[in-house]
Image (spheres, rainbow, N blue to C red):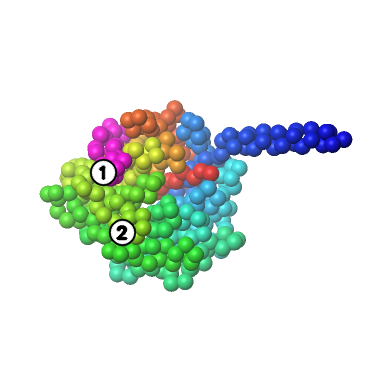
Amino acid sequence: MRAYRWVFVVCFVTILISVNLVWATEPQPHFLYVLEGNGVSGWNINSTTGAVAPNGQGLVKAGTNPYRVASDVGGYRLYVANVGSNDVSAYFINRSNGNLTQVPGSPFAIGRTATAVAVHPSGHFVFVTGANDAPGDYVAVFKVESNGSLSPVLGSPFTTQINPVALVADPGGHYLFVADSSSTGYIDAFHVDMTSGALTPVPGSPFPLTTPAGCPGGTFPEDIIENPAGTTLYTADAFDNAVSAFNVSETTGTLDQVTGSAFPDYTCLNPDIAFDPDTLAIGARGKFLYAGNGGAQTVSLYDVNSGNGALTMVGKSPVCYGGVSSGPILRSDPSGSFLFTTGTSWTNCQGNPAIVVLKINPSNGHAAPVPGSPFPDPNPAGSVSGALVVTQ
């Protein structure tokens, strides 16, 4: 009898191990969300090919003029900053099909124009910039309650420089960085209290952006991203046609500008190609940086120095390459294998709104359209504003 019990135990454990191996290798769903008109459309992503297809839910209502979007780590909740209604919409993400359901109490008022949103890596806090392009602009910080609703943390909002338009949470969760888009551009750097969510400026904050040699002052950064290791920060300095790079102190969060920064994207204040780049993305696990140039309708490719984060221009895509047009947001998936942006259904920058997907060559960084791209958008309801990849 005892021998039979051992046989049963061994068989049971073998079954558990087999099931766990199946779960571990089963591909998890990936989703893309696009802001258009006054709503959010959801797309399923084939994690192998990068191809996208509408998830079938149609346009989900957001606030007035949804502008930027972010998700938590794991892709369980989605947040939309609405510039027209000065609030942030919050949604639960159905992990099986990507459908969205508004959380209780959504949307949540910001008080000023909601220009950007980011989520703490823990998922416990949501950061939203309030920008009236005037003194007193700030970051509002919300705690995510157990039912998904948002409540302001003690001390919120936290003052920034004028016109905060983009922000990024450090992957380690200790710091928050905010790009202030003005003629004298700054990066506000905050330490994040991991318990309360309160923000405290790090030593030396705010950090001024500098202009490329020979360029007149006036950076106007439009986007800010951090490499996956959390060691280098980059801003898209649209007015100066450049990319700034800063090394991040792991212990204090202070910023030191990388030697050679700001790195030219186009000749500064080129009258034919003004205000580029306006968005940035990192690919191949931090090996390459991509600058989306909405005015020029191109994408620039930079090689990233693994030691100090410095950039070397590799080249630019042809105009309207693969349907790339003037999409203000360029984002990679978490694996760094694909680039996603909004564009047009024809590759000469003509046609209807579409999603453009480019596959990154991990050896040289070159990005080529995936089969089927550009993918026509069947439910546009006004101008397309931005996009975000959400994954497990």
* Residue 94 visible in rendering: yes
Residue tagged 2: 254
* Residue 274 visible in rendering: no
Res 267 → quadrant: top left
User: Residue 383 has which mark?
Assistant: none
> Which residue, as the protein is rendered here, is positioned at the far front?
2
Which residue is found at the position 26% from the left and 60% from the top?
207
Viewer-closest of 49 and 245: 245
Find out whether residue 128 is within the magenta segment.
no
Circle 1 SS class: loop
Q: Which residues are magenta?
A: 300-322
Residue tagged 1: 310
Left-right relation of 67 to 145: left
Instruction: Indicate the position of residue 21 as horizontal and vertical percent values.
Output: 62, 35
Res 56 → quadrant: top right
Find out whether residue 320 is within the magenta segment.
yes
Left-right relation of 82 to 178: right
| Separation (CA) of disc 1 from disc 2 | 17 Å
Above or below residue 219? Residue 308 is above
Which residue is found at the position 59% from the left and 42% from the top?
97
Q: Amino acid at mark 2?
A: Thr
Above or below residue 257? Residue 283 is above
